[in-house]
């Protein structure tokens, strides 16, 4: 049973539905206690609450459904006040927009409760075409009394402060916010806003006006300004205008009720033909200024004859008819004009230009031959048109700073900068870059005295194609970080590297999953010895899926055959680029540090390595040994047997993945990717080890063997280099480069500047000679 409306109506509905339910389910044929229990189960929680707490039923009555229904009917349908019900019936009125059928239905419902004998439907007068009457002020106020009379909502409760007048006011000192927190504090303060708009704020009127426009948006004929709202009715006749006004006013009242906007009844001006509205008078005749606003500025000019004026200084004086005075006044005007001309100083910027007369004549001569500058000169002398499209097309790029352009002795200036003709720009670029400084430095030097469109871009392009600068170029900017794939199990991906400590050679193998590394002392640096040490580790921990090494001589042909026999992928990095094998480099640094400190204290280095392997990694919660072997290693530090039992470590890859992403985000802030090189493209390669000249020499890119790794032809030998060690050669070097002379593009280089003889630790030529092209697919 529903409790949301008239209980008596919903009780009748419930009893009818319950009788149907009893009939359908056959409950009437069962025991009365079962019938009473069925009634309690279907009456609903709220009705059961009434049954338990508001009905005085005996024990026998609780088991009789008829008694329960009678008691509930007395509760939900109490005796009615006939006088009051008839008053409600008599005051029932048809609502606006309500159809006559709905109104009659509502009347029948009202009549059922006041003992009124309703007439038959045929006696009811039905109006087919009813016209609404004109809206009156009383109807508007009665219908929308909540809009006019309801108080504005305020914060509930009262607050009372007792201030001691004898206590002086103390101004709190501003809090010093640490500089690291200023941005966060400012962001929090910017999010705060007024919940109640105080009109002491300077922007309060604008905020209030904007809020009114937002609340009344979409209402036609409604104009809110400040704290006034104007409703305008339009029509060809007064009756149409009034009807349109009433419709708009009703829409306004509905919107005000919906958004809870309260209006002042004292300011209501209802259906006036003329209204004063913010300094204007609005009427059917149109708009005119309010006389009260302009009456102080209205001056009445009254003519007075000269003999009636007591102060003669206000009289007009005419000098043309006065003999002798005109000459004096003219002489005074001429003197004033001459003085003004003497105060004006003319400056010719060409006279203050710090160049020789021959150079100035050269600039003027080339300016006269330049079609664009001639059009610009004519436009400056004649005057720039107001419309951009009317200016010459070839001179429009100078229009944004047209006020700064002038012509002096046939030379164009932008402020104090000389505008260089197109034919002189190559010579000026050579002079600007004569010291072979960087592109930005050249531009800063040139922009103080010279100008032409796109000068910044042309200077940068000229510097980038300078062969001398490319030969002695600095290292290129680092590229964004490329990380190895994270393994999903121990000993899946390994990195290897070799290092020397105290004249002893070591091989280090580090596991990417656990950061656990093994170290092997090498009697020699041969590939066979390295492979035997790897076999021993693989027999102990299992075969890996991928092994990452540098391009050392131990990891070439024999190691490639070893990788094929033991079925793992061998990935090599570019020579002279240790960042590509960063995992092994980091482990080597840790191992060297442990060996160095153990030797200094005279301790066993293997014991130091044991303790390191058993130490939990920062922010990981587990040690390298636990991640690899799922157990702690027994050390000289006491530990219970429970701690030494095997426990599988889960979630190993989550924190390293987050740490890698964070490191990449910081690293990439100052990095950018270089464009890929094309096969056969001419490049400049970073000097080889032992080349003390520091020259980037011209080479040829043969192929791309891995991401950011290329094979380069160096005088018939193949070298593998990372992209940061290869710079795209300038166009002149590309055009003049020959295979038999890698430095032919650089004219000053002679035989004495030929590349020195340098032995590459692992020339890729060996791999190609052995026919092991397959190893390059993973480089």
Image (tube, helix red, strand yellow):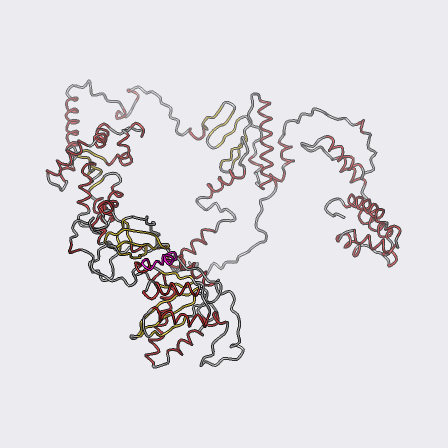
- Looking at the image, which is closer to me, 5 or 713? 713
Along the line of sight, the residue nearer the viewer: 223 or 540: 540
Q: Is residue 725 above or below residue 637?
A: above
Which residue shows up at 33% across the image and 62% down it?
551
Image position of 372 (left or right of 100): left
Asked whether 605 falls inside the magenta stretch, the response is no
622 displayed left or right of 423: right
Which x, y percent locates residue 535?
41, 70
Q: Is residue 656 shown above or below 232? A: below
Boundaries of the magenta span: 768-779
Q: Write the residue at 81% across / 49% down.
A: 75
- x%, y% of residue 87? 77, 37
Q: Is residue 730 above or below residue 91?
A: below
Task: Answer with left or right where residue 337 lies relative to residue 527.
Answer: left
Q: Residue furthest top?
A: 321
In this rendering, position of residue 412 left or right of residue 532: left
What percent of the width, then of the height, locates residue 119? Answer: 82, 30
Give the main secondary structure of the magenta stretch. Answer: helix
Confirm whether the magenta stretch covers residue 771.
Answer: yes
Residue 355 picture location, percent across and down: 13, 41
Q: Nearer the viewer, residue 152 or 235?
A: 235
Residue placed at 34% from the left, 50% from the top? Answer: 676
């Amino acid at each position: 049973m529903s409790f949301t409306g008239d209980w008596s109506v919903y009780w009748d509905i419930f009893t009818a539905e319950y009788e149907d339910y009893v009939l359908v389910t056959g409950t009437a044929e069962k025991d009365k206690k079962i019938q009473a229990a069925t009634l309690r189960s279907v009456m609903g929680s709220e009705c059961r609450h009434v049954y338990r707490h508001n009905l005085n039923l005996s024990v026998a009555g609780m088991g009789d459904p008829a008694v329960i229904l009678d008691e509930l009917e007395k509760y939900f349908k109490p005796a009615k006040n006939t006088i009051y019900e008839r008053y409600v019936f008599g005051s029932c009125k048809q609502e606006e927009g309500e159809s006559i059928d709905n109104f009659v239905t509502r009347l029948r419902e009202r009549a059922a409760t006041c003992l009124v004998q309703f007439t038959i439907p045929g006696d009811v007068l039905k109006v087919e075409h009813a016209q609404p009457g004109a809206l009156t002020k009383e109807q508007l106020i009665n219908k929308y009394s909540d809009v006019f009379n309801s108080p504005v909502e305020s914060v509930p409760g009262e607050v009372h402060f007792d201030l001691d007048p004898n206590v002086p006011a103390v101004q709190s000192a501003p809090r010093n916010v640490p500089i690291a927190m200023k941005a966060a504090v400012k962001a929090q303060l910017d999010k705060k806003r007024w919940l109640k708009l105080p009109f002491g704020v300077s922007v309060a009127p604008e905020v209030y006006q904007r809020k009114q426009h937002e609340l009344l948006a979409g209402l036609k004929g409604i104009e809110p300004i400040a704290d006034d709202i104007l409703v305008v009715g339009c029509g060809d006749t007064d009756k149409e205008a009034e009807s349109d006004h009433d419709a708009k006013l009703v829409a306004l009242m509905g919107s005000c009720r919906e958004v809870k906007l309260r209006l002042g009844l004292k300011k209501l001006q209802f259906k006036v033909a003329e209204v004063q509205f913010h300094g204007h008078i609005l009427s059917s005749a149109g708009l005119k200024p309010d006389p009260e606003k302009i009456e102080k500025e209205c001056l009445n000019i009254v003519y007075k004859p000269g003999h009636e004026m007591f102060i003669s200084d206000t009289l007009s004086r005419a000098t043309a008819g006065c003999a002798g005075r005109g000459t004096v006044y003219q002489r005074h005007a001429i003197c004033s004009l001459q003085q003004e001309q003497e105060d004006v100083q003319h400056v010719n910027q060409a006279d203050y230009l710090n160049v020789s007369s021959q150079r100035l004549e050269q600039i003027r001569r080339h300016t006269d031959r330049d079609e664009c500058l001639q059009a610009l000169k004519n436009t400056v002398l004649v005057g720039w048109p107001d419309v951009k499209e009317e200016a010459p097309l070839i001179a429009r790029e100078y229009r944004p700073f047209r006020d700064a352009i002038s012509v002096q002795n046939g030379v164009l200036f932008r402020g104090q900068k000389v505008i260089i003709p197109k034919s002189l720009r190559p010579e000026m670029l050579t002079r600007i870059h004569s010291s072979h400084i960087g592109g930005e430095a050249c531009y800063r030097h040139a922009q103080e005295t010279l100008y032409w469109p796109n000068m910044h871009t042309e200077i940068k392009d000229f510097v980038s194609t300078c062969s001398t600068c490319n030969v002695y170029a600095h290292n290129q900017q680092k590229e964004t970080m490329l990380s190895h794939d994270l393994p999903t199990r121990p000993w899946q991906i390994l990195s290897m590297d070799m290092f020397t400590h105290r004249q002893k050679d070591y091989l280090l193998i580090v596991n990417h999953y656990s950061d656990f590394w093994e170290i092997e002392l090498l009697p020699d640096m041969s590939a066979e010895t390295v492979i035997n040490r790897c076999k021993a580790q693989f027999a102990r921990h299992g075969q890996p899926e991928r092994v990452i090494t540098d391009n050392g001589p131990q990891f070439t042909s024999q190691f490639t055959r070893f990788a094929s026999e033991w079925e793992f992928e061998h990935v090599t990095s570019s020579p002279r680029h240790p960042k590509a094998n960063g995992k092994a480099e980091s482990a080597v640094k840790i191992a060297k540090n442990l060996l160095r400190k153990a030797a200094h204290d005279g301790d066993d280095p293997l014991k130091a390595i044991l303790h390191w392997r058993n130490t939990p990694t920062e922010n990981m919660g587990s040690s390298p040994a636990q991640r690899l072997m799922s157990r702690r290693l027994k050390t000289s530090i006491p530990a219970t047997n429970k701690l030494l039992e095997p426990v599988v470590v889960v979630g190993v890859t989550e924190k390293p993945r987050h740490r890698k992403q964070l490191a990449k985000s910081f690293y990439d802030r100052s990095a950018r990717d270089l464009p890929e090189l094309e096969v056969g493209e001419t490049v400049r390669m970073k000097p080889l080890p032992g080349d003390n000249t520091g020259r980037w020499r011209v080479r040829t890119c043969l192929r791309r063997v891995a991401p950011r790794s290329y094979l380069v032809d160096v005088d018939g030998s193949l070298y593998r280099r990372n992209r940061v060690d290869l710079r795209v050669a300038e166009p002149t070097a590309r055009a003049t480069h020959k295979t038999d002379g890698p430095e032919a593009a650089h004219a000053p280089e002679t035989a004495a500047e030929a590349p020195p003889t340098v032995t590459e630790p692992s020339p890729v030529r060996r791999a190609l000679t052995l026919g092991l092209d397959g190893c390059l697919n993973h480089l």
